[in-house]
Structures are given as C-alpha cells and as structure tokens.
Amino acid sequence: MYVPAHVVTNNDLTQYMETTDEWIQERTGIIERRYAHRTEETTTTMGVEAAKIAIQRAGITVADIDFIVFATLSPDYYFPGCGVLLQRAMQMKQVGALDIRNQCSGFVYAVSVADQFIKSGMYKNILVVGAEKHSFGLDLTTRGRNISVIFGDGAGAIVLQPTEDNNRGILSTHLHSDGNEAEILAMYNPGTHANHWKANAASFNDSAMADMFMSHAMIDKGENFPNMDGPAVFKTAVVKFPEVIMEALAANNYVAADLTLLIPHQANLRIAQFVQHKLKLRDDQVYNNIQKYGNTTAASVPIALCEAWEEGKIKEGDLICLAAFGSGFTWASALMKW
Ligand SMILES: CC(C)(COP(=O)(O)OP(=O)(O)OC[C@H]1O[C@@H](n2cnc3c(N)ncnc32)[C@H](O)[C@@H]1OP(=O)(O)O)[C@@H](O)C(=O)NCCC(=O)NCCS
C-alpha cells in the first residue's frame, strides 16, 4: 500500500466548509484522511509506489509481470487509462493493461478478472492495482460537504499468481450490478449523456455543433463534482454487503463464523458495523481502517488487506473475504484461503 504523507484531519476541513469533527466521526467514523501532493503525485504514481512493494514482496521483478489490471474512478487522464501509464512508469514489458471502472467495487472486480486469467492459465504474475486521487475532484466547500468529508487518496496493489495447492488461493468471486440506481452516486460530467438519463444533469448549449462536453455554465454551477444521495447509498449498502458475503460463503460450504477476517470496502464505519452485526461477527473478524484514510474507493480494500497482513491478522490457511459495494450500484465479493 501507499498513502500520501499529507494528513488532513476533520478539523482541517472546517477551514473550507461548515462541518465539525463530531459530525464526521459520528456519521462515518472517519478521523483523518490523506491528500496527495497536488502536482507531484497522481493516481498512477501512487499505484506505482504500491506496485513496487507488492512486486518485491511477491519475490519477483517488474520483468515478471505479464498483465496489469488497474482499478480507479479518478484516472490521470479521461483516456488512456492508468494501466498504460503504470506500464510506462515502471518500464514494464509491453504487457496487456486493463483499466477497471467499477468505483468502490473496482478492486474486487479487478481481482475477479485477474483470477480468471490465472485459472485459465493465460498469465502467471498479474499486477492488480487500486488507486485514487479524490482530493483533486472534490467540492471542498459547504455545497459538497456530504461527499467531500468522506473521501481520501491512496493506493494498494497485489500480485496474483497460480498455485498447485487446491486448498489455497481464491475460492470464488461474485459480481453484481443494478444500474437502476446509477445516478444516486455518480459524477455526471464531463460525459456524453446530454441529459439523456437525468434532466438538468449538465448545463450546455445545445445549438448544432456546440461543445456539449464541458461548458463554463457547468463549472459555474458545480456540475463537474460528484453527486451522492448518502442515505439511499447507506440503505442499499447494508443489504447488499451481507448478501454478497453470504453468497461467497454458501458457494464454498462455509458459514460466517468460519471467517478469519472480513475485509470490507471502507465506505463508512457505520456500514461495516451494521454488516458485522448482521453476520454476527466478532470485532476481530472485521478489519476497519477508515478512521485513518477515509473512503479511498478502489484503493480501500487493498490498503486494508495490506495493513491487516502487516499487523499479523492474516496467516497462511486463513479464510479471508473481500467485499465491496458502491456506485453503479455494483457489489462484489472474493473468498480466499490465504
Ligand atoms: C453521507 C452520510 C454520512 C450522511 O449522513 P446522514 O445521516 O445520512 O446525513 P444526511 O445526508 O441525511 O444529512 C443530515 C444533515 O447533515 C448535513 N450534512 C451533510 N454533510 C455534512 C457535513 N460534512 N458536516 C455537517 N453537516 C453535514 C446535511 O446538510 C443535513 O442537514 P439538514 O438536516 O439540515 O438538511 C451517510 O448518508 C452515509 O454515509 N451514506 C453512505 C455513503 C457512502 O458510503 N458512500 C460511499 C459509497 S461506496
């Protein structure tokens, strides 16, 4: 994992918007988050830092990586994706690079894709990265406070490899989506939607051949920032998280009590506590570090996985479940024997 050095506390945010440490902690559990250096760090550079550690810990070199999967919703460029920028920055061979854009579920989706390539025998050392530089695209005024206080920057990475041992590795992955709620947690602009899906999502000049992608009016009205109906996200998250975890356990003939550690996407501490309660898990069976990093979207699961492993909470043979829910809506789980 890699997180930027710059710590932003809840109190720091009160300089920019009307909020309080108490409100943020009570509703989300977050105490502080990291913000990337404004010009020296990008989503890709943070992904590179995490990738270097993952490659070193896997006991291989950059030259051994034969595929890249990069999950993010805050890419350096609208296109091309971060995968190729990482390939260039790490001076890798001309291997395939796939970008995944499933927001908070991005890393678990990425793990699932990598798992299929490993199981089919196509690749042997897949670098899977989740990274976000949210701080660059947040409305840090009172207008955007319900979203801005939640998110932070960072990156995590793993190297996925095949094993001959049938009792180890990824047992199964489970992926879901429901696009009916796409606009509930979304950044509409810039985009090509032209208000097709949602009225007044963007202010643009619709006279023939005028630029509809980005306009001064959109910026003036703050239409370039993310939108979130927090309570609606919360309500669905607390249903879908337990569902997809139970789906993973049932598919492998396990029950919740068998879990060594659940590593949920760090969306909100209250959501994780709700899931813990629903599945009747002990405190030591659920890993939370949102207090320190906020919600880092595609980076949150690998950052939590890394910290849990570094703290000795994950050992060989343990039953580990990764689970995520987020914008789309999309949700997913991966059950593994470490
Ligand atoms: C966002 C979230 C923390 C808001 O908490 P909530 O209890 O639902 O709060 P509401 O949105 O109903 O807002 C309650 C009040 O707090 C205010 N408020 C919103 N953000 C605030 C902030 N940062 N500081 C202080 N007050 C804030 C609202 O304006 C509202 O005021 P009002 O009652 O005068 O209108 C909560 O809904 C949540 O965590 N949802 C899930 C979000 C999530 O996980 N997103 C990522 C998905 S992967």
Image (spheres, rainbow, N blue to C red):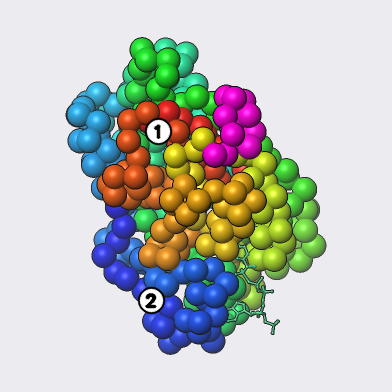
Eye-nearest disc, 2 or 1? 1
Q: Main secondary structure of the magenta part?
A: helix
The magenta region covers 246-257
The residue drawn where x is 54% and y is 87% is 18
Mark number for residue 9?
2
What crowding class fits label 2: few (fewer than 14 Cα within 10 Å), some (14-19), or many (20 or more)?
Answer: some
Left of 115 or right of it: where is 238? Answer: right
Quadrant where the C terminus lies? Answer: top left
The residue that disc 1 covers is 318
Mark number for residue 305?
none
x, y (%) of residue 170?
46, 26
The residue drawn where x is 40% and y is 33% is 318
The residue drawn where x is 23% and y is 42% is 53
**Residue 337 visible in rendering:** yes
Q: The residue under label 2 is which amino acid type?
A: Thr
Q: Quadrant of residue 90?
A: top left
